[in-house]
Image: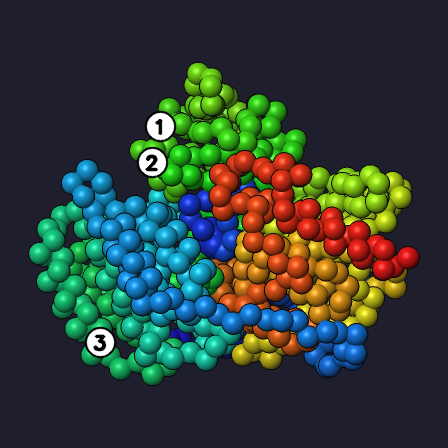
Amino acid sequence: MPNQNKTQNSAVAIYAQLCNSLIFINRSVFFAVLLGIVLSAVPQTGSAQSLPENRELITRKGVSVNSSSTPRSSLVTPNYQTVPKPEQSELEDIILKGNALETPSENRPIDWNEALNFWESALRDYPTEALLLKRYYRARIQYDVNYRLADRRYVELVNNMSTDLGRETLSDILYKINFSYVDNANWAVISHNGLVGISQALRNPAFRRQYLSRFNVEEIARMELRWMQNARSIPVKNANDAYSQAVSVASMVKRDCQINEAVIILEYLCGILNVLDQYTCLLTPTQFLDMTNQINGEFVGIGVELKTVKGELKVVRPITGSPAQKAGLRPGDSIVAVNGQRTVDSTPEKISNQLQGESGSTVYLEIARRNSPNQTVAIVRQPVKSPCVENVKIIDEANRIGYLKINHFQKTTADELDAAMFYLNNLNMKSLIIDLRGNPGGLLTAAVEASNRFISAGTIVSTKGKNPQENHDFYATREKTSSIPLVVLIDKNSASASEIFAGAMRDHRRAAIVGTQSYGKGSVQGIFPLQNSSLGLRMTTAKFYSPLGKPFVRVGVSPDIEVRKASLLSEDVAPYEIIPEQDDAVLQAGINAAKQRSASYE
């Protein structure tokens, strides 16, 4: 690998969430603050991220960053739960179901989106089960190959990328892994996963159609065997060796198949990145741009939250004030076709591309609605602002209990929270419920700033990584904070930045936490632009810890009051069906907790 005579290329000033969502965090939903649609995913989707530029902003807004310790006399030790393990019979049943999803039939190719959703769901129940993790990574590699090949901008970029730029990109990413990845690099394992990435791409039907249509299956297998034997003859002990291995195999493929070297180099890199952890990945030009827009809370699109339900593309909700809402889309609507192409015959990647477009352009959706004939709706794509804080109201008039829902944490969250608090205080609010259910996370800084509205002193969150530049304690220093009695609602989809907020409230005994165990995301991703290209890199650079120093990874936040039934989006209710407030057991438990906390303050 060429010498890197430079200092670390810090992550750009983005603390992104996502999805697994997408892309990242649950593929049955494409998180489309990206596309102008918002996807119900936790991720490809909630990753809190850190950066020097934003740290200066934090200090100006009343949150200090320091690496020293802080007094914690006001903290209480939470009851962190242990990670469950499946019974052998249950594990075998999971594997059989997964095998069925990954077995093609005569009329049905493998749906890697569905398979990936399945393994993601299994991992959420059993996050430390090695076999499930292995199957998840294989499905992820296949899904991502399909996703990249469906991205026209990516395909055009790699097909025209020069040899020098391809190798420079390889060198850049290997350097960042060596310097900034949260764990120490085992280069023998890392390089093996790079070769697996190439092999999986060679087995992918879409990749073969794109690059290997001149060869039959047997010819590809023979060439692959020769390429891999040569590559594995190169001992890999460090990043330089990995660079040499990747260049060697890419050169052979280019010679034998006339495939641009950058195509194979990037598959090698994706094989490495996709197996480092669930949140690290290469960002295509479209993903990189969309993620930037997502962080800013503004994007061009139709403004609707979608989720696939038993093969149907369902509207969960249109964003307030969005083109989708103005066009009359309702929760529960099924999108049957996009621009005349049936969604059932398409893939999430292709639908994503169809929904994207320039401001002022029109997309045509065929909508199926219960007890109504299908209708075609023309929606003009426009800039959409995705609000963080919604449904601000007095939910219990007699006891003056305020309520607000934080959908995600982005740059505007603290200001929106201030406005909501001002409104509710003018209505003589006596206590407040903050609903974080389904909140996949967002900006680390936004979670810290929101927490600082209610915590006057002490640590809010700490980050620790291999690189000392990632080690920080984020302190509360705001002079004026609210002392309102507080309740926070969480569920298994409350992740990342949501867990920072809930964990700080819990450890400081500032709020009663009501609901179910949170997601357990607990890691920090940096978003890096790659030199001389429009690609990006999302990579785990640190893990974050509660004020008491407790980890969140695979653990999450435990509620003070556990309520297992009827959350806002219940397991037993379709994701687009909002439970009436009187039937929402978690909300009702939160109201009771707010009454009790309010009484104790009097």
The secondary element bearing badge 3 is classed as helix
Quarter of the picture holding the C terminus: bottom right
Q: Amino acid at mark 2?
A: Ser
Which of the marked residues, 3 or 1, is nearer the chain's N terminus?
3
Q: Secondary structure at mark 2?
A: loop
* Left or right: 120 as drawn, with respect to 199: right
Q: Residue at x 41, y 69 (%)?
A: 85
Q: Residues within 10 Å of mark 1 (few under 14, many from 20)?
A: some
Q: Are marks 2 and 1 in contact (CB under 8 Å)?
A: yes
Question: In terms of image quadrants, where is residue 457?
Answer: bottom right
Q: Which residue is mark 1?
A: 341
Q: Which residue is mark 3?
A: 232
Residue 522, horizontal then vertical, whole percent: 56, 66
Residue named by callout 2 = 346
Q: CA distance from mark 3 to mark 1?
A: 45 Å
N-terminal-most mark, 3 or 2: 3
In the rendered view, tell whether residue 371 sits above or below residue 100: above
Identify the amino acid type marked 1: Gln
**Amino acid identity at mark 3:** Arg
Q: CA distance from mark 3 to mark 2?
A: 38 Å
